[in-house]
Amino acid sequence: MSHTTYTYEDYQAAVTAIRAVTDRQPEYGLVLGSGLGVLAEQLQDPIAIPYKDIPGWPRSTVHGHSGKLVFGTLEGKSVVCQQGRAHFYEGYTPQQITFPVRVMHFLGVKTLILTNAAGGVNSAYHAGDIMLINDHINMVGMAGNHPLYGANDDRLGPRFPGMAQAYTRKLRTHAKAAAQNARIPMHEGVYVCVSGPSFETPAEIRFLRLIGGDAVGMSTVHEAIVARHMGMAVLAFSAITNAGIDHVDSETDANHEEVLEAGRVIVPKLSAVVRGVLRTV
Ligand code: HPA
């Protein structure tokens, strides 16, 4: 695979294009996963910029991902929201997928809030649940497709960043308090990133369970790694849109429609927790 690499100037060109539209200085970045984009409609005083107007910005081809960067206010905090994201399985490199995270950093974002649709690996998880991510297993990155592959630009971060606290403890504490206050049950667990786009086989679900995974999806960890590389704080949630199928005699199979459908049920829960966090930080 060819690895697209960006220069410092590429990030600045994207920032310049955005600055031609707005001079807002968002402190919080929000990335909305499959079926979760409607959360962006809750922003006050929105200013939207289509991804196609930003040089270098990768565009998702997937149904359920609209391609806009939306600036606004949520719970009094200045937020920039990525309504839709690009994925590895669409043919983008991890470097391309994480270009927006770098641009958000240069726009002033200090805290990145990531969301995704995910399959339940933990047998106690059901479609419609939400999970706070407290750690991850990057199957794609461990296999060599890593967002920090290639020359390191020391202006962005260190060559070998630590990941012992990839998901900021203080933010996790805020999220748990917010869920409790809103009386929303929330799991906490380990997100496994796989390439996709095929969903997991039953043997793969049992394997992911064995290695300590609780949820499985095709995004998020690339962005979390790049954000931590630049010293941003990270908070991340999985919307459990379907329970992983763990036996070959199952009558059902996972599909994208059920992912989008469950997203609709989950948006109010995720929105309450994210808003609760923004109120308290
Ligand atoms: N597996 C991987 N990614 C997903 C799933 C799944 O079951 N559901 C939503 N995204």
Image (cartoon, rainbow, N blue to C red):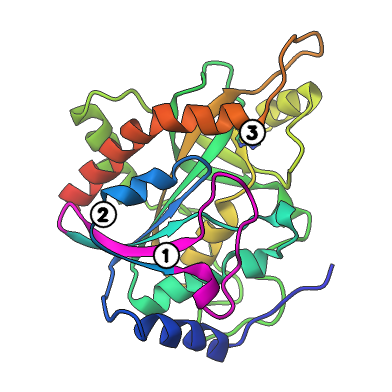
Question: Distance of mark 1 from mark 2, alpha carbons?
Answer: 12 Å
Q: Amino acid at mark 1?
A: Leu
Q: Nearer the viewer, residue 266 or 174?
A: 266
Question: Start and end of the magenta stretch?
Answer: 50-76
Residue 135 image point, x, y percent:
51, 44
Check disc 3: other Cα within 10 Å, few if <14, some if 14-19, many if 20+: some
Q: Earlier in the sequence, mark 1 or mark 3?
A: 1
Check disc 2: other Cα within 10 Å, few if <14, some if 14-19, many if 20+: many
- Res 205 → quadrant: top right
Is residue 127 magenta-colored?
no
For image coordinates 61% across by 57% down, the residue present is: 60
Residue 244 image point, x, y percent:
65, 23
Is residue 64 magenta-colored?
yes
Instruction: Report the label total.
Output: 3
For image coordinates 36% across by 84% down, the residue present is: 19
Check disc 1: other Cα within 10 Å, few if <14, some if 14-19, many if 20+: many
Q: Secondary structure at mark 2?
A: loop
Q: Is mark 2 within 8 Å of ligand 1?
A: no
Q: Amino acid at mark 2?
A: Leu
For image coordinates 33% across by 75% down, the residue present is: 108
For image coordinates 29% across by 25% down, the residue present is: 184
Instruction: Judge left or right: residue 53 versus residue 56.
Output: left
The correct choice, above or below, for 14 with respect to 192 in the image is below
Quarter of the picture containing the N terminus is bottom right
Q: According to the image, label 2 marks what residue? A: 43
Instruction: Judge left or right: residue 96 versus residue 71.
Output: right
Is disc 2 in contact with disc 3, using a CB cutoff of under 8 Å? Answer: no
What label sits on residue 27 in the rendered view?
none
What label sits on residue 69 in the rendered view?
1
Q: Earlier in the sequence, mark 1 or mark 2?
A: 2
Q: According to the image, label 3 marks what residue? A: 256
